[in-house]
Amino acid sequence: MRWIIGLLLNAGLLLLLAEIFEGFQIEGFVAAIIASIVLSIINLIVKPILVFFTLPITIITLGLFLLVINALTLLLTAYLMGSAFTIDSFGLAILTALIISIVQTFVIKPVKNG
């Protein structure tokens, strides 16, 4: 049940980001839910592999490179979703990844766990 709550909150966050940023577009709530599921699967399977192979640069940058990895997972999600979910630039992907990380840390995780 907590996973579904987190999924819905992430979908809502994606829709909010689509309203805020012009280059970040998602077609609707169903597309946001699907994007949230795809992003969760990518974070479960692909992200640990990326973190492992980029561990030296992550250590050198004191963990800031993880933001780049989060942006890459967002771009991969957008690529897999096709025209239903688009991000225009890598810079926008980094900015939205930063916002998503902050919101997940301070809002979504406490709501899921509480």
Image: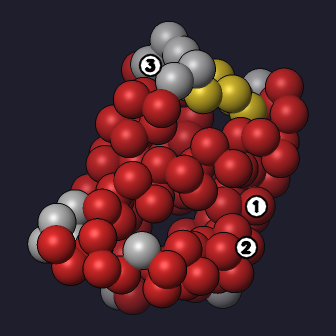
What is the distance, in whole Å, between disc 3 and disc 1 at their CAs?
21 Å
Instruction: Report helix, strand or loop for mark 1.
Output: helix
Q: Is residue 100 visible?
A: no
Structural distance between the alpha carbons of marks 2 and 1 = 5 Å
- What residue is drawn where x is 60% and y is 28%? 87
Quadrant where the C terminus sits is: bottom left
The amino acid type found where label 2 is placed reads Ile
Quadrant of the image occupied by residue 3: bottom right
Amino acid type for the residue under numbered disc 1: Val
- Helix or strand or loop: what does disc 3 sit on? loop
Residue 53 in the image: state x and y as whole percent. Answer: 49, 80
From the image, tell me which residue sits under label 1.
38
Residue at 34% x, 65% y is 66
* 4 lies left or right of 15: right
Q: Say which quadrant the N terminus sits in.
A: bottom right
The answer to whether 48 is drawn above or below residue 24 in the figure is below
Name the residue carrying label 2.
Answer: 41
- Whichever of callouts 3 and 1 sits on the residue coming sooner in the sequence is 3
Query: Which comes before the other along the chain, label 2 or label 3?
Result: 3
